[in-house]
Amino acid sequence: MRRSWMPGERKRVLERYSLDGPAKLAAELGRSVDSISSFAGRYGQKSLRSRERQAASRSRGSPSLNTRFFDEPSRHGAFVLGVIWACGSIKTKHGKVLRLVVPADRRGVLLRVLELMDSKHQIQTYDERKVVEICNAYLVSTLLDRFGHPPSSSPEPELPWIGSEFVPMFASGHLQATGGRDDTHVRWSGQKDVIVWLADEIRRQTRAGPPEEDRFGGRLTIRWRAQSDLAGIGRWLDEAL
């Protein structure tokens, strides 16, 4: 026998459906999900969760970039993570946006990131800086869930959640964004905890000696000058590319 809708049930569904969704209301009222959805639909109610799923589906299918770029760890993904941990931030207040900012003379690293991500986003110029903003909820959510928050987006600095095999590519991306390399030295600059971790990984994987250090507030620069260290670190970086 078909169960009639009581006034209190009707009121509950119409007031809470958009926020709670059909599953939660079905459990509370002892009805099926289909029954709740059907009733709400007759009154033009749409679930917020349904809209979120639709938005996520649209986000995954965006033609403007490879939204699944961070779905799995990869060498190219590690390179981009290095750039993000050096000069990136995440904005979530009005949509989820990945923002990268570099000096004008490092525009090339942004072009490389956009190329790797199959992105059609444009690079903007602000004073002496080059900026790219990639707005895609699925991409940003996957980045945060799988690899952590970049330092500028978290009150508690996080190290990137990557395996040791991806550190050379991460180091290369970070180096191209904020570091420097020539015949006389190689250096990395960035958030202190990240650079300390990176220095330890470089020494462990290349057997380089201790680097020089320059600290300024929460930032740290590490530098190697010895030719033996430069040769070893250079091979380590070049083999990763």
Image: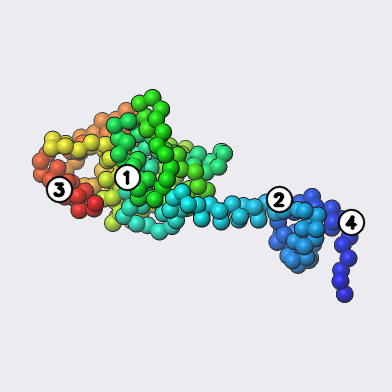
Could you tell me how far apart the alpha carbons at marks 2 and 3 are, in whole angstroms? 57 Å
Give the mark nearer the N terminus: 2 vs 3.
2
Residue marked by disc 4: 7
Q: Nearer the viewer, residue 219 or 84?
A: 84
75 above or below 131? below
- Return the residue found at the far bottom: 1
Asked if residue 204 shows in the view, the reply is: no
Q: CA distance from mark 1 to mark 2?
A: 41 Å
At 13% across and 35% down in the image, what residue appears? 184
How many discs mark residues in the rendered view?
4
Instruction: Name the kind of residue labelled 2 in the image.
Output: Leu
Label 3 vs label 1: CA separation?
25 Å
Tag nearer the camera, 3 or 1 = 1
- Coloring scheme used: rainbow
Q: Which residue is mark 2?
A: 19
Q: Quadrant of the N terminus?
A: bottom right
Residue 181 percent location from the top left of the image: 20, 38
Disc with the residue nearer the chain's start (3 vs 1): 1
Question: Marks 3 and 2: in contact by CB < 8 Å?
Answer: no
Residue pointed to by mark 1: 112
In space, the residues marked 4 and 3 are separated at their CA atoms by 76 Å
- The spot of residue 78 in percent (x, y) is 34, 51
Left or right: 111 with respect to 99? left
Residue 8 placement (x, y as % from top left): 87, 55
Name the spot of residue 137 as percent of width and height, x first.
52, 48
- The residue type indicated by label 3 comes to Gly
Q: Earlier along the polypeptide chain: callout 1 or callout 2?
A: 2
